[in-house]
Image: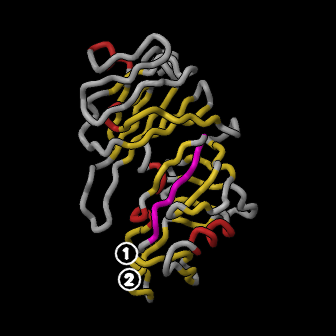
Amino acid sequence: MLARKIILQPIVSIWMGRQRVGGATEGSGGAVIFGGVDTTKYVGNFTWSPITDKNAWKIRLDAVSIAGKDLGLSGEALIDSGTSLIVVPSKAASIFHEHIPGAIEAPQVGWILPCNTSAGDLNFTISGQQFRVPAEELVVLFRIPGYAEYCKSAIDVAGSATETDWVLGASFLKNVYSVFDYRSLAVGFAQPSNVYNTLTNITLLPNLSNPPQGQGNGGGGNRTQGTGNGSTGVNGSVQRMVSGVDI
């Protein structure tokens, strides 16, 4: 697409819909945009983190806290939209669940926790910025046979022999708006706006070598302004330059 000038920048942005505990739908599906972002889906600026492995979307994870308590954890994390949960080394999983009331490690099931867990929010610090995973998102909504009122934990244990890396999958990604920059080799995150309308405000990012400093918005009026030639709202030319795909 870049070679054919269908898009201006080699980036992919991802927004995932969410669903609350209890099954009330907040938004249906999600969206992948090639070459741009949807400014209605995030607020504030992007926080950028360079990748630590040129063969993978792996970034540095500075710190992790739960209910405001620093867990003393850090490392490298693979950002993977194809993984459902947050996957961590076994030692880290034990530390996590020590701070979740009622959590237990069940035989042949793994870590489970009360479906109505009272654990505090989980926060990941990336490039100095905290990104929140609400406590209710730690609950995977299916019952565990033999464990009444228990659900699967969204914090899963890594299966590799080394168990050194983390994987931040959908349980993390549905709480951010993410951008993958193939030229600068960096991943950008912004806070989600909790707006669940259709793609109506796609904006090109013409110069991601200098990450955009403008803000997303919760409505449909403003546009993100890049630091290069500026960004353009949705019009005839932009629609030819950006491919938006609902998933």
**Residue 116 screen position, x and y as percent:** 37, 75
Q: Amino acid at mark 2?
A: Glu
SS for dot 1? loop
> Of discs 1 and 2, which sits in the foreground?
1
**Viewer-nearest residue: 210 or 35:** 210
Residue with the most extreme bottom position: 146
| 149 versus 3 height, above or below | below
SS for dot 2? strand
The stretch of residues the image draws in magenta is 119-127
Image point (31%, 45%), residue name: 194
**Residue 218 screen position, x and y as percent:** 29, 36
| 135 versus 130 height, above or below | below
* Residue 121 lies within the magenta run: yes
Residue topped by disc 1 = 116
Residue 149 image label: 2
Upstream in sequence: badge 1 or badge 2: 1
Say which quadrant the C terminus sits in: top left
Residue 28 image label: none
